[in-house]
Amino acid sequence: MKQEFNINLSKLLFDLIAVNIALGITNLIIFYTFWVDGWSYPSLFIFINLSTIVSFYFTKQKLYNPSFNLKSILGFSLKYLLIAFLLVTIYWLIVLDRKYYLVHLGIFYSLSFVLVLLLRFVWIKIFRNILRRIYSTKNVMLVSKNYKDIAQSIIHNDWLKYSLEHSVGELNPKDISLYMKQYDLDILIIDLKENLSTIEDYKLAGKSENLKLFFLNPLNPKFYQLKKIIGKYKLYQL
């Protein structure tokens, strides 16, 4: 748990570095200095950082990881930054009443967007190797008729340290214990798209074997918690 907290904290710190560099450069462009005197700018500096932190956790940015490509990072970051920018704009226009410096916000938002994306690529580049070293190997089994494509995505993302032990198209929950003993499984990934067994059957079987269950393609994702993203695949838990 502490390991995951530190990893997520590193993601947030990279974003905060990007946003604060963008603010400093914007001040330099507009006012020829990194820091502007007066009560309003220190308060704006604090609010920008708070908005970034709140938006980061509200939009579950901790889910982005080294499996993300440019398109994934762009889409995943856009909603997060728009919410942060909206909060800052409201504070700027209503609380600070700085309507005549909107050009300042425009430059800041543009730089923030570019720098956040850039530093996220840097984070991915750095932490792909770090995660490969600090994660322990986990034995995984896939239950999906599309297991070849999913397996390829897992193999490609070797930083996960997932050791793919076995794959089947269908699985009776009663047989989980047999596979558990045979392959010493840590994780079971089940595609619900064409699976006829109920979630509760899998949940009970997994709990009895102390097995971590992830679900792909649930019928109603809103009733699940999105826990992990591997490439184009979203892994949910109840």
Image (tube, helix red, strand yellow):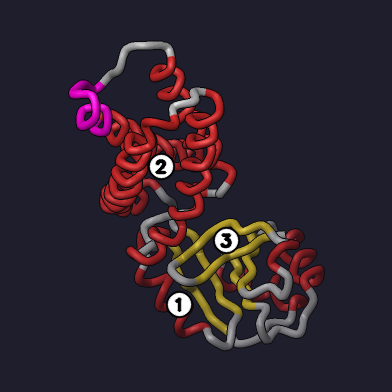
Marks 3 and 2 close (CB-CB < 8 Å): no
Q: Residue at 46% of width from left, 57% of height from top?
A: 76
Classed neighbour count for the residue bearing mark 1: other residues with Cα under 10 Å, few (<14), some (14–19), many (≥20): some
Element type at mark 1 = helix
Q: Residue at 23% of width from left, 24% of height from top?
A: 31
Instruction: Name the spot of residue 167 as percent of width and height, x first.
Output: 54, 81
Residue tagged 2: 11
Which of these two is toward me, 209 or 122? 122
Instruction: Name the spot of residue 231 as percent of width and height, x first.
Output: 43, 68
Up/down of 225 relative to 16, above or below:
below
Q: Which mark is residue 172?
A: none
The answer to whether residue 129 is seen in the rendering is no
The region drawn magenta spans 25-34
**Apparent side of residue 53 relative to residue 174 in the rendered image (left or right):** left
Classed neighbour count for the residue bearing mark 2: other residues with Cα under 10 Å, few (<14), some (14–19), many (≥20): many
Task: Tell me the quarter of the picture where residue 71 sits.
Answer: bottom left
Q: Residue at 45% of width from left, 47% of height from top?
A: 81
Which of these two is toward me, 67 or 71? 71
Element type at mark 2 = helix
Residue tagged 3: 186
Up/down of 24 relative to 129, above or below:
above
